[in-house]
Image: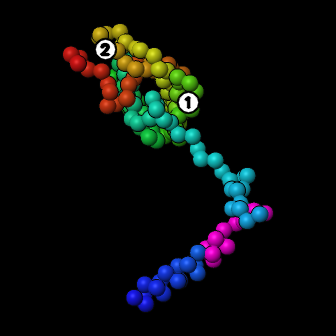
C-alpha cells in the first residue's frame, strides 16, 4: 500500500513544478503564443484535396495531380513532371504551380463546374486548364476515385 501512496504524493508534489515551468503572463495565466510564431501553411481541403485526374481531347492528354507533383502525359508520348507545393484555393477555383526541368513553368487551374469532354456523355466535376511551354490545354477533371465511367 505504501508504494501507491508514495507515488500519489510524488505526483501531487510534481504538478505545481510543471505548472511553474510554463510561460506565465501577469496574473498567473499561461502566456499566449508569440506574435511572430509562424502560421501553418494553408492546405487544400474539400473539393480540391486528394489525387485529381484531368483529361483532354484534341490533342489527347492526361494529368494527375498528386500531393506534391503534377504529372502530364500527352498522346505523342511526352511526359512532363513538375513538383508543386500545393494549390492556391479561391472560392470555386484552385491553381497549382510547378516547375519542370524540361519545359519550365506548369500552371494547372481547376474550376468547380460540370464539364463534358466533348467526345462522350461523361460529365466531370471540374473544368481543367494546363498552361505549359506557351501552350494551353483544356479539358475536364475529377477526383481520382470519382472519375466518371462509360455505362456507370
Instruction: Classify 37 as above or below 138.
Output: below
The magenta-colored residue range is 16-26
Residue at screen point 23% across, 19% down: 152
Q: Position of residue 145 (x, y in %)?
A: 31, 31
Q: Who is closer to the viewer here, 108 or 135?
A: 108
Q: Residue at x 46, y 41 (%)?
A: 68
The residue where tag 2 is placed is 122
The image quadrant of residue 26 is bottom right
**Which residue occupies 35% across, 9% down?**
118
Instruction: State the residue in front, 61 or 1.
Output: 1
SS class of the residue under badge 1? strand
Instruction: Say left or right for 93 vs 150.
Output: right
The single residue placed furthest to the left in the displayed view is: 151
Of mark 1 and mark 2, the one earlier in the sequence is: 1
Image quarter hosting the N terminus: bottom left
Q: Position of residue 55 (x, y in %)?
A: 37, 22
Pick the front one: 101 or 124: 124
Q: Which residue is labeled 1 in the image?
A: 89
Amino acid at each position: 500500500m505504501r508504494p501507491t501512496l508514495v507515488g500519489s504524493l510524488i505526483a501531487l508534489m510534481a504538478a505545481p513544478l510543471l505548472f511553474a515551468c510554463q510561460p506565465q503572463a501577469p496574473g498567473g495565466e499561461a502566456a499566449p503564443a508569440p506574435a511572430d510564431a509562424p502560421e501553418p501553411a494553408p492546405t487544400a481541403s474539400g473539393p480540391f484535396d486528394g489525387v485529381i485526374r484531368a483529361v483532354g481531347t484534341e490533342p489527347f492528354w492526361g494529368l494527375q495531380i498528386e500531393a506534391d507533383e503534377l504529372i502530364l502525359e500527352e498522346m505523342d508520348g511526352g511526359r512532363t513532371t513538375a513538383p508543386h507545393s500545393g494549390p492556391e484555393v479561391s472560392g470555386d477555383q484552385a491553381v497549382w504551380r510547378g516547375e519542370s526541368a524540361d519545359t519550365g513553368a506548369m500552371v494547372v487551374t481547376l474550376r468547380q463546374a460540370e464539364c463534358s469532354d466533348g467526345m462522350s456523355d461523361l460529365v466531370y466535376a471540374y473544368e481543367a486548364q494546363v498552361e505549359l511551354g506557351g501552350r494551353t490545354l483544356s479539358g475536364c477533371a475529377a477526383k481520382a476515385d470519382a472519375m466518371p465511367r462509360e455505362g456507370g
